[in-house]
Image: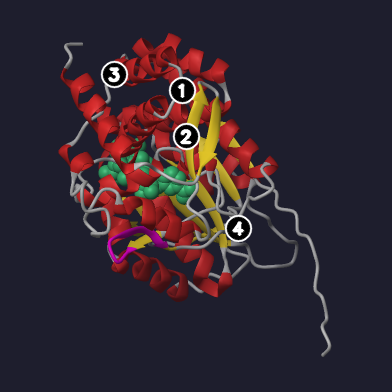
Amino acid sequence: MKTIRQNFAVSFNYDVAFTEGLFNPSNKLFSSQIQVTDNKPLPKVLCVLDEGMLQYHPDLFDRIRRYRDESGSRFQLIGKPVIVPGGEASKNDPSAVQLILDAIEEADIDRHSYLTAIGGGAVIDVAGYAAGIAHRGVRLIRVPTTVLAQNDASVGVKNGVNVYGKKNFLGTFTTPHAVLNDFEFLHTLDMRDWRAGISEAIKVALIKDAVFFSELESNARLYQQRDMEAMKSLIHRCAELHLEHIRTSGDPFEMGSSRPLDFGHWAAHKLEQLTGYSLRHGEAVAIGIAVDSVYSHLAGMLPEEDLERILELFKRCGFDLYVPELEHKLDQPRQKESILHGLEEFREHLGGELTIMLLEKIGKGVNVHEIDTKLYREAVGVLKSFEKEPA
Ligand code: NAD
């Protein structure tokens, strides 16, 4: 038998930039990301726009056109943007991916052209998936327009769509060409979407950075008052911690079974499904983190005072921490509709051994490989009573 052993390493580089007024002609950030080659046709840019976002920014495409004309930017803007429904609807409906692929084909977008996705995390995930599979990967510029998309969903290497009722069942690991965060988009978010992204910041603070957790505690009231400076700081630090993890964890493309950044997500993904996606991803993550934190405490890992601080912070930020679906078919974990089936779906998604992140203290996560279902039921009970307590 003969074997040729293949081995090579590739390094990935991309900027995650923060700005305001991305498409003001004086702002050079967007055009600086487009690579122009002498004596070659100007690169093409095809935009994918989130319909929900567009309601609040109806002149966005005109502004992009003006930007191209007035900023000296050198690219060919494809005249018709692709508009896909905002939110999870776009990840649940296969026609959204198809629409983007059709437009890529029609506009002759090649691997040196750019798909620019502008919207919430869901639309960015769908566009990223289409960009990842067309020609085995066209360049993707992400322009996230929600808190959660800016501080988490857009900064990393994953994209995906939901199939078989399962979150992100189809997807690829592909790095973006660039991530351009424009804080101005955040002004038009409704309160739910403004708040939802805070849960991902709480998550990453809990597993990695106790000092950041204290900052979130100090600023909780400011987030409620929609203080933009406080939110910018939250987004920046949260994005930085996610990027640092991807860069330094040794497993950027999640080949192993451990996925610390998905703390609280096994229950969250199942809750999104069980509630028919009426919960925002970030809202479900808040509940998932809360239940796993209570569980961590009941399992003897997390001190009581830390648990109190965690639940208190979520409440002060305005999150609800209990939905009846948390108890759905609790005693029938093998049934697909059981909340506990989320554990198996999570394991399946990662492959290998079930690995769930829990908490040892604020700022430090710990991996476990089993969940005691009796204790989980107790944890749900604690959360339910906590929710009933007067604020
Ligand atoms: P979302 O994409 O569902 O958007 C929520 C709503 O906000 C939608 O109705 C959308 O149309 C609207 N919207 C978007 N921008 C707006 C703006 N500026 N003004 C007004 N309305 C606006 O929610 P999200 O929280 O941004 O993203 C959640 C998604 O991100 C989930 O599908 C989740 O699975 C995914 N996600 C992906 C990753 C990843 O690594 N790929 C990580 C975390 C989350």
Q: Residue at x 59, y 47 (%)?
A: 178
Q: Residue beneath label 3, please?
A: 315
Q: Secondary structure at mark 2?
A: strand
Query: 301 or 309, which is in the foreground?
Result: 301
Q: Residue beneath label 2, please?
A: 358
Residue 174 locus on image (x, y percent): 57, 58
Q: Residue beneath label 1, please?
A: 302
Span shown in magenta:
163-169
Q: Residues within 10 Å of mark 3 (few under 14, many from 20)?
A: some
Q: In the rendered image of this protein, does residue 210 appear above or below residue 190?
A: above
Among numbered discs 1 and 4, the one appearing first in the sequence: 4
Q: Residue beneath label 4, please?
A: 255
Q: In the rendered image of this protein, does residue 158 appear above or below residue 208?
A: below
Report how far apart the C-alphas of labels 2 and 4 lie in the structure.
20 Å
- Give the overall secondary structure of the magenta segment: strand
Asked whether residue 224 is in view, the answer is yes
Looking at numbered disc 2 in the image, what kind of residue is underneath it? Answer: Leu
Looking at numbered disc 3 in the image, what kind of residue is underneath it? Answer: Lys
| Magenta segment includes 166 | yes
Is 9 left, or right, of 51 in this rendering?
right
Q: Residue at x 68, y 55 (%)?
A: 35
Number of marks present in the image shown: 4
Assess whether mark 1 and mark 2 are in contact (beta carbons under 8 angstroms): yes
